[in-house]
Amino acid sequence: MGQTGEQREAMALTTPAVRRRAPTKIFLTLPRKVLQEKPGIGLGKFYSRLDLELRILGADVTMLPLSRQPHKRKGNRTKLIFLHNGAAEEPNVLNTALAYADPYWHVDPKGVLGLSSAGDVPFVHADVDKAQAAGFFRALRRDFVKTRSSRYYQAREKLPVPEGAIAVFMQGDTGLTRRTMRPGSERMIRAVAEGAGGRPIVVKHHPLNTNPRDVEEVAALRAEGVNICEVAANVHDILEQCVATVSVSSACGFEGFLHRKPAIFFGKSDLIGFAQSAHDGPSFAAALEEALTGSRSYMRFVYWYLTTHCVSLHSETFIQEILQRAAAIGFDADRLGLDKKAVAALSDPKAV
């Protein structure tokens, strides 16, 4: 039996209107210096491509300096924030940063570098294709080891490095080291000296951020007769000569994997499932023994880590991978207000 006009009117008064949710606004928050540089320079290459490809898909995108920090509006589900060098575990944040090897980037809901969610995922050696990993590993060695290139400027001339040394890479006093450090960097140096078993120790300070306390600790240990010295050599020359790397959570530990050298971390690291951890002299001695005697598939781990947990700036599927990460935290293409035909064309160009 059909409804009367009065019944329909009554329902209209009691049934709430269904309103279409406004598309999510996207904010790219990055250092002011990067914003002021020409697009496509340095770190800006990532954000320029991300901004362009999101706009092509119809997204509402705004670039902001980090000081504005819109992510602090917790639980704001009308904004998706890409937070440079972030460690914000918020439901509307993807933390971004250059990962351990350029052009691979973190786009992560938990954090970047030592704080990324990759540290929560076990590495299973048997699950990684050996042939694919081998080709990938060779290409990385060609790009970094053979050219002696790294994230920061490196000495081009060959400087002497003691063979068989333990290489300690300092990271200075930064937000990341403060968030990930356990004993303090100067105490880390002393712990290495206590557990080195007589091996020579070389210390390379961060090229952009040297901590005076680290310099004082090295001088004090040398005065006590410890075989320790500071070096300014190219990181790859150090990695070629050393037996293991030590740091809070330095990218040099990952670069050491390209030389098949084990890493020991004194801070929180997302590489810890493939490396060793320590916090004092005795634990370092035990970690060093395990590092030097254990068997590891460096090429499989490097391939797995970079291709599974990072996004390559050079990838043909760059924006698809970004959208997958956004969808994983609840911001799918529809919620972002993206053009459906443009999104469909990403996987099927004939759909346009």
Image: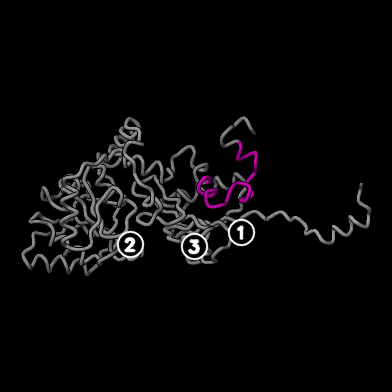
1 or 3: mark nearer the eye = 1
Residue 36 in sight: no
Left or right of 36 in this view: 180: left
Confirm or deny contact between disc 2 and disc 3 (CB under 8 A). Answer: no
Residue name at image x 58 percent, y 54 percent: 61
In screen coordinates, is 268 left or right of 330?
left
The kind of residue on which mark 2 rests is Thr
Residue 215 location, quadrant: bottom left
Which residue does the numbered mark 3 point to in the structure image? 65
The residue tagged 1 is: 78
Q: Which mark is residue 180?
A: 2
Disc 1: CA contacts within 10 A as few (<14), some (14-19) or many (>=20): some
In the structure shown, which secondary structural element does the residue marked by tag 2 occupy? helix
- Residue 131: x, y in percent? 32, 30
Give the CA distance from mark 2 to mark 3: 24 Å
Please say if the residues under marks 1 and 2 sit with CB atoms less than 8 Å apart. Answer: no
Distance between the alpha carbons at the discs numbered 1 and 2: 31 Å
Crowding near pointer 3: few (<14 within 10 Å), some, many (20+)? some
Instruction: Give the mark nearer the N terminus: 2 vs 3.
Output: 3
Give amino acid for label 3. Pro
